[in-house]
Amino acid sequence: MTTPTALITGAARGIGLATARMLQSRGWNVALLDRDADELATAAADLPAGQTLTLTQDISDPQAAPVFLRAVDQRFGRLDALVNNAGVADFGPIGDTGFDRWRTVMETNLDGTFLTTQAATPMLRDTRGAIVNIASISGLRASTLRVAYGTSKAAVIALTQQQAVELGEYGIRANAVCPGPVRTKLAMAVHTPDIIAAYHDAIPLNRYGTEDEIAEVISFLVSPAASYVTGQCIAADGGFEATGIGLPALRG
């Protein structure tokens, strides 16, 4: 059991699935976890069976992580990388964000990331493995309608630093990736032409990112090539974070 193994949460679609495919193309075994059983089955149908384990679980359940980590151990016998990608996006004004909506976001984005990492730590110690937490550009720069989402992602960035500091003595590395606007099916379905144009104006590269571009960053961070990188937050955002100091019209 020497083949490196990754566990990716929220892996039925989007960045999680793109990362699974990329790592498998580079020889990894991958456990894909998602609470959407139907979508997960559809995703797994195109993946190599010998390199794939599917897990239908909800990471916000405090009892779930030990169960699915045991399944990973039984199937692959090791864990070299944990990609905490599962997340809930809930956008709305502060005044309309009731505590139930707040908790729904926090339970998955923050609590689930904490619980999964805590349960995975013994296996990661054995391999001196890597953690990549998927935060968001919304955790680095504030925006309207993102009080719960943005706060949860800022907390994930802080949690990543705590993990890096405390788990580094075991050889475990922890980093965060903060995607900017990404051209997913969901984003294209809900972003109006005006929103798309505004993002293109605000991003120095003048475009959305792709799922594979984010997967490349994640794949680097879990690889031996990043063996001295820990405690970092990498914004894969086309330069979006850097534009906070000026107006797009002035860059013309």
Image (spheres, helix red, strand yellow):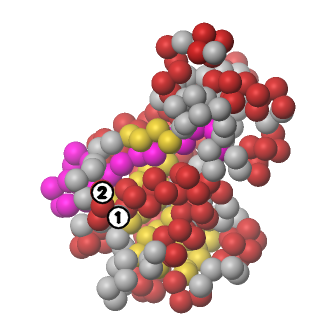
The C terminus appears in which quarter of the rendering? top right
Which dot marks residue 226?
2
The quadrant in which residue 189 appears is: top right
SS at circle 2: helix
Q: Position of residue 227 (x, y in %)?
A: 25, 59
SS at circle 1: loop
In terms of depth relative to the viewer, which is nearer, 118 or 237? 237
Q: Residue furthest left?
A: 169
Q: Name the residue type under label 2.
A: Ala
Q: Position of residue 165 (x, y in %)?
A: 22, 45
Residue at 76%, 48% in the rendered image? 186
**Residue 105 appearing in the image:** yes
Q: Name the residue type under label 1.
A: Ser
199 horizontally vs 113: left or right: right
Mark 1 Cα shell of 10 Å, populated few (<14), some (14-19), many (≥20): some
Residue at 74%, 43% in the rendered image? 187
Against 67, is 154 above or below? Answer: above
The quadrant in which residue 196 appears is: top right
Which dot marks residue 223?
1
Residues in magenta, as a range? 164-182
Whether tag 1 and tag 2 are in contact, CB under 8 A, the answer is yes
Q: Position of residue 60 (x, y in %)?
A: 55, 54
Against 51, is 24 above or below? Answer: above
Q: Position of residue 225 (x, y in %)?
A: 30, 61
In terms of depth relative to the viewer, which is nearer, 174 or 211? 211
